[in-house]
Image (cartoon, rainbow, N blue to C red):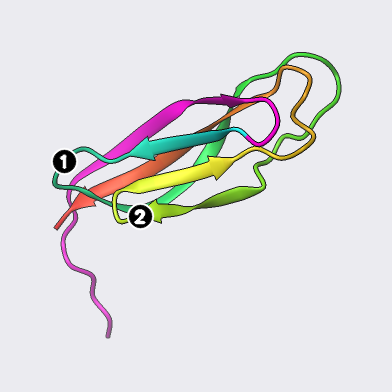
């Protein structure tokens, strides 16, 4: 039977809005914590058209989650990275 270790100090961090074409948002975990998962949220939306999902949604390193907007983000749409962090 698999059993995970205890997660110490679980935290959710939101990065700044990434607005426009090929913009990047980085959500960085507090010092001493590592990213265990991540994702994104819509930070702002105006207009009726545009993409509502990032082209990139990946860990940038051990403590940072990164999203990059796509080519269809031209009409006031913004996305923000979310990092889920924990200590060991």
Tally of marks = 2
Q: Is residue 21 above or below residue 31?
A: above
Q: Quadrant of the C terminus?
A: bottom left
76 or 8, nearer to the observer: 76
Q: Is residue 5 magenta?
A: yes
- Determine whether, in the image, residue 82 is placed left or right of residue 32: right
Q: What secondary structure is marked by label 2?
A: strand
- Which of 26/52 is in front? 26
Q: Which residue is mark 2?
A: 61
**Residue at 23% across, 70% down:** 4
Which residue is at a point 19% across and 48% down the rendered structure image?
Answer: 33
User: Which stretch did the figure color magenta?
Assistant: 1-22
Q: Earlier in the sequence, mark 1 or mark 2?
A: 1
Q: Is residue 59 left or right of residue 80?
A: left
State whether residue 48 is above or below residue 56: above
Q: Position of residue 20 (x, y in %)?
A: 68, 25
Q: Could you tell me which quadrant the N terminus lies in?
A: bottom left
Q: Quadrant of residue 52?
A: top right
Q: Furthest-bottom residue in view?
A: 1
Mark-to-mark CA distance, 1 and 2: 13 Å
Which dot marks residue 31?
1
Q: Which mark is residue 72?
A: none
* Residue at (77% x, 24% y) in the render: 74
Residue 48 shown left or right of residue 58 in the figure: right
Q: In this view, which residue lies farthest toward the right?
A: 49
Tell me where residue 28 appears, x and y as whole percent: 32, 39
Q: Is residue 21 magenta?
A: yes
Residue 9 vertical placement versus 34 (above, below): above
Q: Give the image location of residue 5, x and y in percent.
A: 17, 67
- The residue positioned 21% from the left and 37% from the top of the image is 30
Question: Within 10 Å of the Cα at label 1, are there few (<14), some (14-19), or many (20+) other Cα atoms?
Answer: few
Asked which secondary structure carries label 1, the reply is loop
């Amino acid at each position: 039977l698999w059993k995970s270790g205890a997660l110490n100090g679980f935290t959710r961090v939101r990065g700044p809005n990434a607005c426009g074409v090929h913009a990047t948002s980085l959500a960085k975990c507090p010092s001493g914590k590592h990213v265990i998962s991540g994702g994104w949220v819509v930070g702002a939306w105006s207009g009726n058209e545009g993409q509502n999902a990032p082209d990139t949604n990946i860990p940038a390193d051990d403590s940072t989650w990164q999203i990059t907007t796509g080519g269809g983000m031209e009409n006031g749409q913004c996305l923000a990275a979310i990092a889920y962090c924990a200590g060991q």
